[in-house]
Amino acid sequence: MSVIDEDEALIAAVLAGSPQAWEKLVKRYESRVFNQGVRLMGSRSDAMDLLQEVFLGVYRNLHRFRGDAKFSSWLFRIAHNKAIDLNRRKRLLAGISVNAEWEADPLASFSADRQQEPDMSLMNSELNQRIVEKLSQLPLAQRLVVELKVFQSMTFEEIADVQDISENTAKTRFYAALKKLKQTMEEEHVLP
């Protein structure tokens, strides 16, 4: 059974009232949504807020999922919209742009299966933290495209659908973001 078929079966069971199916559906996607939240929101606590809002929104609107696209695309469209809303609220409340302090190891997922040497793990962790810090300096529109392409492995077509933009706009944002990231990281000697 493919992931799409499994998702459809779980959705049908959730709509029929199965709490176990809901739990399986959440567990299937929670770490991806959380990690996306860390990269987009800037902190683990904001990512948890995003995670809660996303799954609350999914639960409330699951009956509206028509199956025209993959469930994961629909889910990440909700995450995209909620991240924009939360960023707006943060800016309004703080009165400044969203560039929150990054917490230690923001890319750590719920289930880290890495078996690396301690020195390599530390180096990778520090580099990942620097990359995430640089990502936070990009405009939100570019950050979202990078998130979906690099971290969620979506195609430009899927990104265009999730963000309600053209494929060319998705590509333009992605490559502009990569160019900015490369420039800032080279200037600060993060990359050789």
Image (cartoon, rainbow, N blue to C red):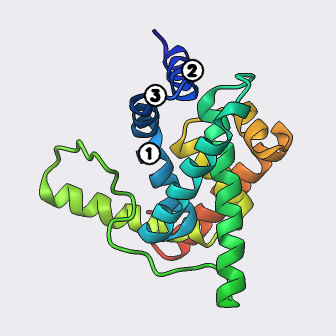
Q: What residue type is disc 2 on?
A: Ala
Q: Tell us which disc is closer to us: 2 or 3.
A: 3
Q: Disc 2 to disc 1, how far (Cα)?
A: 19 Å
Label 1: which secondary element: helix
Q: Is residue 115 above or below residue 12?
A: below
Looking at the rendered structure, the secondary structure element under dot 3 is loop
Q: Is residue 56 above or below residue 162?
A: below
The spot of residue 25 in percent (x, y) is 46, 33
Residue at image mark 3: 18
Q: Residue at x 64, y 61 (%)?
A: 83
Viewer-side label of 2, 1: 2
Sequence-wise, the earlier of marks 1 and 3 is 3
Residue 20: image location, x then y, percent: 38, 30
- Identify the residue position indicated by label 1 in the image: 30
Q: Residue at x 79, y 49 (%)?
A: 172
Q: Nearer the viewer, mark 1 or mark 3?
A: 3
Do the residues bearing badges 2 and 3 touch, measured as CB atoms within 8 Å?
no
Query: Looking at the image, is mark 2 or mark 3 earlier in the sequence?
Result: 2
Question: Of the residues shown, which amino acid type is indicated by label 1?
Answer: Glu
Q: CA distance from mark 1 to mark 3?
A: 18 Å
Q: Which residue is mark 2?
A: 12
Q: Amino acid at mark 3?
A: Ser
Residue at the far front: name it. Answer: 17
Whole-percent x, y for residue 73 in the image = 65, 34
